[in-house]
Image (cartoon, rainbow, N blue to C red):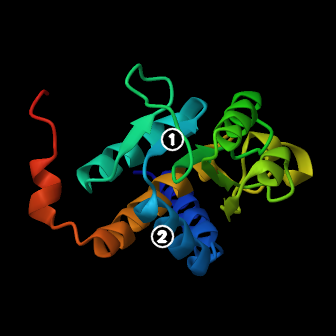
Amino acid sequence: MSKAGSDIFATALDELGAVLARIDETRIDAACQMLAAAGRIAVYGCGREALQVKGFAMRLYHLGLPVSVVGDMTTPPLGPGDVFLASSGPGETTTVLTLMRVAREAGAKVLLLTAEPTGSAAKLADFTLVIPAQTMASDQGAARSSVLPMGSLFEGALFLLFEIMVLKLQALTNATPEAMRARHTNME
């Protein structure tokens, strides 16, 4: 890697570390408690955020939690005692807002991950976990804060945050590495 390439790599890693350092750990713990206590969990995100959310859903399944991804034909209905986890970095994603309303009307709790604590989505959520990172809503002009393009900083932070949440949930649910491994698909 060239010197310029390694500088960009180091800068991106520093930016990710700075974002994660600013996330309130007590809120991470509370979000994990919500998920561990849920009757059912349904997750949703748009675009590249959806990829991170789907990866997290896979790990929730490995932990033995009752999870589904909105849009899959096997997603059950949500109701009281259930949690809808939604990711909307910009906090204004139309599809997310609509699904949040549906979940709330059914009696489920809404857990939102966003970079915009004052956005429309945060106003609808029962619980908001703020990830203070650049998104598509803040990637231009004076608001731009990352060497990474568009919403990549938020998406990368989601991945790392979800991995930490898996570790916390593993402790909360007493899921052993062996039990998690046993739930991994054999259909690949």
Check disc 1 and report its element: helix, strand or loop. strand
Residue 96 in picture, x, y percent from top left: 69, 35
Check disc 2 and report its element: helix, strand or loop. helix
Q: Amino acid at mark 2?
A: Gln
Cα distance between the residues tagged 1 and 2 = 16 Å
Image disc number at residue 131: none
Q: In the image, what residue occupies the spot 69% across and 39% down?
A: 100
Mark 1 vs 2, N-terminal side: 2
Outermost residue, right direction? Answer: 142
Q: Quadrant of the C terminus?
A: top left
Residue 18 in picture, x, y percent from top left: 62, 72
Is 31 left, or right, of 37 in this rendering? right
Depth check, front residue: 137 or 150: 137
Depth check, front residue: 188 or 62: 62
Q: Report crowding for label 1: few under 14, some 14 to 19, many 20 or more residues within 10 A (C-alpha).
A: many
Select label 1 or label 2 by which is in front.
2
Q: In the image, what residue occupies the spot 90% across and 52% down?
A: 142
Residue 83 in picture, x, y percent from top left: 54, 50
Q: Are marks 1 and 2 in contact (CB under 8 Å)?
A: no
Depth check, front residue: 23 or 37: 37
176 in relation to 93, above or below: below
77 in relation to 42, above or below: above
Is 132 left, or right, of 87 in this rendering? right
Q: In the image, what residue occupies the spot 45% across and 58% down?
A: 162
Q: Which residue is mark 2?
A: 33
Depth check, front residue: 38 or 183: 38
- Res 55 → quadrant: top left
Residue 143 in picture, x, y percent from top left: 86, 53
Q: Amino acid at mark 1?
A: Val
Image disc number at residue 43: 1
